[in-house]
């Protein structure tokens, strides 16, 4: 999933579904996916058991998302 896909998913989760937290998981060796999650502002939670295996787990709260979104919007003059 690309960075723009992840941003669209976060936007949907927080605005349409009104989720409090967005979680994402990937294989611990998938550094490309981990970079995308980190660029979105997701916080690494560690290795957790999901889908009957240990996966790298990330989370982003709605407040963290709002803060990151406000920093990335252009400033009007």
Image (cartoon, rainbow, N blue to C red):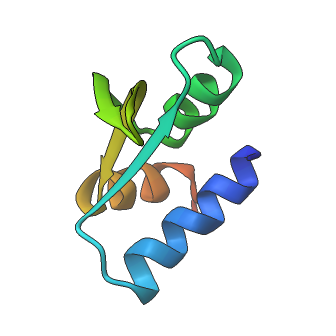
- Furthest-front residue in this view: 52
- Furthest-bottom residue in this view: 16
Mark yes or no: residue 76 visible.
Answer: no
Q: Tell me which corner region of the image, top left, top right, bottom left or bottom right, holds residue 21.
A: bottom left
**27 or 52: nearer the viewer:** 52
Q: Position of residue 73 (x, y in %)?
A: 58, 59
Q: Position of residue 56 (x, y in %)?
A: 42, 24
- Furthest-top residue in this view: 29
**64 or 18: nearer the viewer:** 18
Report the number of discs.
0
Vertical placement of 68 versus 8: above or below?
A: above
Vertical placement of 47 versus 40: above or below?
A: above
- For image coordinates 33% across by 48% down, the residue present is 60
Q: Position of residue 30 (x, y in %)?
A: 64, 18
- For image coordinates 51% across by 16% down, the residue present is 28
Q: Quadrant of the C terminus?
A: bottom right
**65 or 71: nearer the viewer:** 65
- For image coordinates 64% across by 15% down, the residue present is 31
Vertical placement of 6 versus 62: above or below?
A: above
Mark yes or no: residue 23 visible.
Answer: yes
Q: Is residue 53 left or right of residue 48?
A: right
- For image coordinates 63% across by 54% down, the residue present is 6
Q: Position of residue 72 (x, y in %)?
A: 56, 50
């Amino acid at each position: 999933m690309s960075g723009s896909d992840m941003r669209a998913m976060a936007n949907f989760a927080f605005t349409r579904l009104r989720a409090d937290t967005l979680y994402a998981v990937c294989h611990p060796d998938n550094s490309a996916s981990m970079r995308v999650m980190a660029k979105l502002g997701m916080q690494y939670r560690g290795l957790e058991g999901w889908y009957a295996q240990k996966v790298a787990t990330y989370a982003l709260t709605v407040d963290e998302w709002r803060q990151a979104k406000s920093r990335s919007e252009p400033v009007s003059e």
